[in-house]
Amino acid sequence: MTVQVFAQRPTTQPLTQPTKQVATQPAAAFLTALTGGAPSWDTWRDALAPERVEQPAEVARLLAFLDTEVDPDAIDREGEIPPFVIARLRDLGAFRLATGEDLGGLGLTPYALFRTVEAVASRSVAIGFMLAVHNGIGVATSLLPTLPHGSLRDLIRRRSREGMISGFADAEPAGQGNQWPRTKAVPTPDGSAYVLTGDKLFISNGPVADLLGVTVTVRDEDGPRVGLAVVDTRSPGFEVRAGLEYLGVRGLPNGWLRLNGVTVPRDHVVTSAQGDPRRTPERTSAFLTARMLIQAAPALALARNCLRWSREFTARRRIDGIGLGEYDLIQRTLAANAADVRAMDAVVRWSLGGPAPGDRWFERMIARNFCTEAATRVVDRTVSLLGAEGLETDRSKRRRGAPSVPLERAYRDIRMLRTAGGVDDLIDVQAAQALLTHCADTAPTGLLDNGLPGALPATENFFPRNARHLYDLHEDLARFAAVCHDVAARPAGERQRRSGQYPLLLLGRIARELLGAAAVLATAEQDGHQRLTDVHCTAARSRLRDLWAQLDAPDQPDHAGIARAVLSRDRHVDDLLGL
């Protein structure tokens, strides 16, 4: 599907875009700076969460169990989390981390929950992913808070108290995010229940879940509507057709599910009088937070692990009697890894912490890609660094008695995290669509007549290089706001010299680079990590120059023509490419 980028509003609405009920942002929200060109530096700093949160005793016991009784290498090798591990996780309350204290849970805040999932994923990404799915998009977190009193609410509360495992079944063989799910819910003759029929694919936690939220198309006398059905997996007709194995995060319970005439009570299907119940402001907010739990938290865990492995490797290696850490390229690698980890941490603190984190929906929307992309850089650099000792698997190194780390697993896992829950490129496009929609309803307020930003914050607490980075950031924010408003103001349907999804992709990537720079600069005064801030902002400046250049390019190669030739099996092209 092609999206006209130079139009008054984007022609498609992203799945995760909140409605106008949450579109008005307080000054601390980064969206205000991106579309208004008026950064509010003091409120940005106030929005940061503490770097660390106090760890409950229950979480400490959970981590101790993972450290002493769980073999993450075996989980990756066998492609399964052992049943005894899942049972013990239930006993330890791992499936009640976000559940309220009235239901026997810890009631962790989103930020504290993120830190817990990160800690679990640092031991096993598969287990961290499983806990994130349940505590992020399970029925107790994504559905229960909005349910009225009744049998469905009572069911979810009771099963939550018992430590149930849950998930969300939306994706189908036909794809994810279609307006009309192919799974049907047809009323019984007496109207007391619905019969569900259809397949769901790539459903995390599906093979081990007790209750599942299932998207359906309801077919009744009022016409077709999208609904959310809560299915007890013990019901007749529910079947796990196959367990699925991914390139990474091996061991994650994931499956192809079939609902072959599953009957659920009528009030166990949630619909909206108008619109799609998947896209209410409350569920949109929950899904955005879940993305950070499911993808960003394991990504940060992997990046921290790689930074530790890089440090340990460098400390024990010498070349010609000189410590590896004395070489320029190694120093640059370590500094880049440390700066990326610090930037990821700062973006998470900004996106989930501080007062009213629910208002910062756009930060959560782009933080997922920011973290998975930064972690990819860290993992890739670490593979190159440790490759000096042989690009071996962990198992091979152990056989010859060499120090070993699960770097191969990290390499596969981070690639998986960039795709799970939505391909990363599409999420950048969706972020740009949300920006343009917001721009259509606002006006830039912080720009001078020359298009540059207004008053800059005091910089006496910054290193000179970081003061320059701060000025560059304000210039970029002003430029970005002007570009977005120019795009949004163009008449709908007007043919422009560039259209399609790629300019949207570039806008989304620019937005997350600006968020990262703002976050690390906001933390620099608080934690004193001025040198790390400089390293990140210098690298970000280089990436931004390339992104701006691509966005401003007057023309592009004929990608569409080449793609059509490849798809048409053009003989000349096939011969040229050796196909």
Image (cartoon, rainbow, N blue to C red):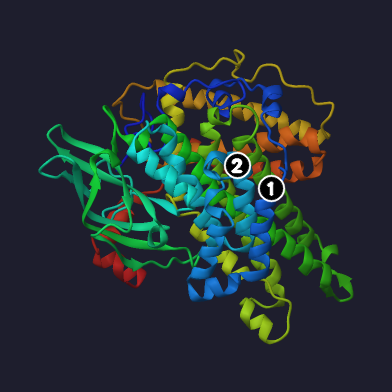
Residue at 62 percent of width and 14 percent of height: 448
Tell whether label 2 touches label 1 (CB within 8 Å). yes
Report the Cα–Cα distance between label 1 and label 2.
Answer: 9 Å
**x and y percent of residue 390 in the render?**
67, 78
Q: Nearer the viewer, residue 282 or 483?
A: 282
Observer able to see residue 4: no
Check disc 1: other Cα within 10 Å, few if <14, some if 14-19, many if 20+.
Answer: few
The secondary structure type at the circle numbered 1 is loop
Residue type at mark 1: give it: Pro
| Disc 2 target residue | 108
Q: Residue at x 64, y 20 (%)?
A: 453
Which residue position is annotated with label 1? 56
Q: Is residue 190 left or right of residue 90?
A: left
Mark positioned earlier in the residue sequence (1 or 2): 1
Question: For the C terminus, which image quadrant?
Answer: bottom left
**Would you place residue 178 above or below residue 569 in this image?**
above
Is residue 411 at all visible to an observer of this figure? yes
The tag on residue 466 is: none
